[in-house]
Image: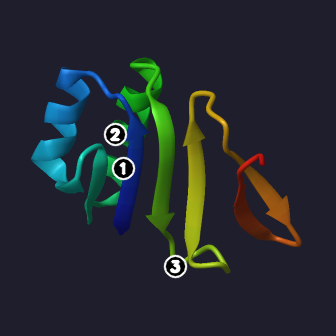
Amino acid sequence: MIVTISLVGPSTSVRGMLRNLFLEPQAHLFVGSVNTKQLLEVVSILERSKCVGMIVAQSKKHPMGVRLKQLGLNDRRIIEYDGLQLIEKPN
């Protein structure tokens, strides 16, 4: 499963953990391929550490092909429109 994680100001320990599993092409942006079990562990760690950001995971079971998950509160939010997940950013 291809996963993209974008975080806002993650702690050093979280960033180090993510660097072990993913590539970091840009600061606080992590991209890589993990299995479902690893993804669930990463999400659990990120939720416990109260990170702020967004996770995009490829899923062949979902009709859209990807699934979005928001971590923490920020100025963007995920909205569902006719079965399609979109990211809304206020003006």
- Please give the residue where the numbered disc 3 appears in the rendered image: 60
76 horizontally vs 20: left or right: right
Q: Of the two numbered discs 3 and 2 on the same chain, state the one appearing first in sequence.
A: 2
SS class of the residue under badge 1?
A: helix
Say which quarter of the image contains residue 18.
Answer: top left
Q: Are marks 2 and 1 in contact (CB under 8 Å)?
A: yes
Using the numbered discs, state the Cα–Cα distance from disc 3 to disc 1 in whole angstroms.
15 Å
| Residue pictured at 44% horizontal, 27% vertical | 51
Q: Is residue 30 above or below residue 57?
A: above
What residue sits 28% from the left and 53% below the top? 30
From the image, tell me which residue sits under label 2.
Answer: 42
**How busy is the neighbourhood of tag 1: few (under 14 within 10 Å), some, or many (20 plus)?**
some
Q: Is residue 9 left or right of residue 18?
A: right
Instruction: Tell me which amino acid carries mark 1.
Output: Leu
Disc 2 crowd rating (10 Å Cα; few below 14, some 14-19, many 20+) is: some
Q: Residues within 10 Å of mark 3 (few under 14, many from 20)?
A: few
Q: Amino acid at mark 2?
A: Val
- Spot occupied by residue 60 in the image (x, y as percentages of width and height): 52, 79
Residue placed furthest toward the right: 82
Q: What distance separates the C-alpha of mark 2 from that of mark 1?
A: 5 Å
User: Which corner quadrant holds the N terminus?
Assistant: bottom left
Q: Position of residue 83 (x, y in %)?
A: 82, 71
**Label ID, residue 49:** none
Q: How is the image coloured?
A: rainbow
Residue 91 sits above or below residue 52 on the image = below
Badge number at residue 39: 1
